[in-house]
Image: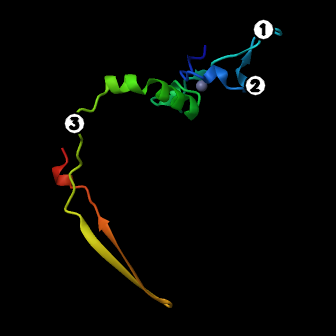
Amino acid sequence: MTVFNWCHGPKCHTHHTVDRVRGVKGSKVLRTRKVKQNNWNANSFFSHFCSQGCWNDFAYAHWEEFIRLHPRTECLETPIKDPKKETHTHDYSWGRHSYTNTKIEVDESRQS
Ligand SMILES: [Zn+2]
């Protein structure tokens, strides 16, 4: 017996693919895909969704509910060291080129 979940994509059964066609002549349907449970999709959303597209459709349909379930009422912060400006200069045959970037490093000593 194969263990499976029905794909939770709200529009899964509307996609026109041959593998979704079920039923007898005269009463054919496009049916939600079964998602077999295996080592590859264990512990990931692919255990309940047949594709990234079905996952996206589900997220777009239910995001308000997710936000009610998992509200962010305060910002989060990652402790960093004081950012350092670094100028890099390179000499080329056609001249000198330099650019500056800002190095941002996580401060592991302040990580909770
Ligand atoms: Zn699907």
Residue drawn at (75%, 10%), measured in percent from left and top? 23
The amino acid type found where label 3 is placed reads: Glu
Q: Seen from this angle, which residue lies furthest left?
A: 110
- Position of 7 with respect to 70 (left or right) is right
Estimate the x, y position of residue 19 in percent, counting from the top left.
Answer: 72, 24
Q: Secondary structure at mark 1?
A: loop
* Residue to which mark 1 is pinned: 27
The alpha-carbon separation of the residues under discs 1 and 3 comes to 53 Å
* Residue to which mark 2 is pinned: 18
Residue 11 is drawn in which quadrant?
top right
Residue drawn at (26%, 59%), measured in percent from left and top? 105
* Residue to which mark 3 is pinned: 74
Residue drawn at (60%, 17%), measured in percent from left and top? 2
Determine if the C-beta at disc 3 is less than 8 A from ligand 1: no
* Residue 39 in sight here: no
- Callout 3 touching callout 2 (CB < 8 Å): no
The amino acid type found where label 2 is placed reads: Val
Q: Does label 2 or label 1 sit earlier along the sequence? A: 2
Estimate the x, y position of residue 3 in percent, counting from the top left.
Answer: 56, 17
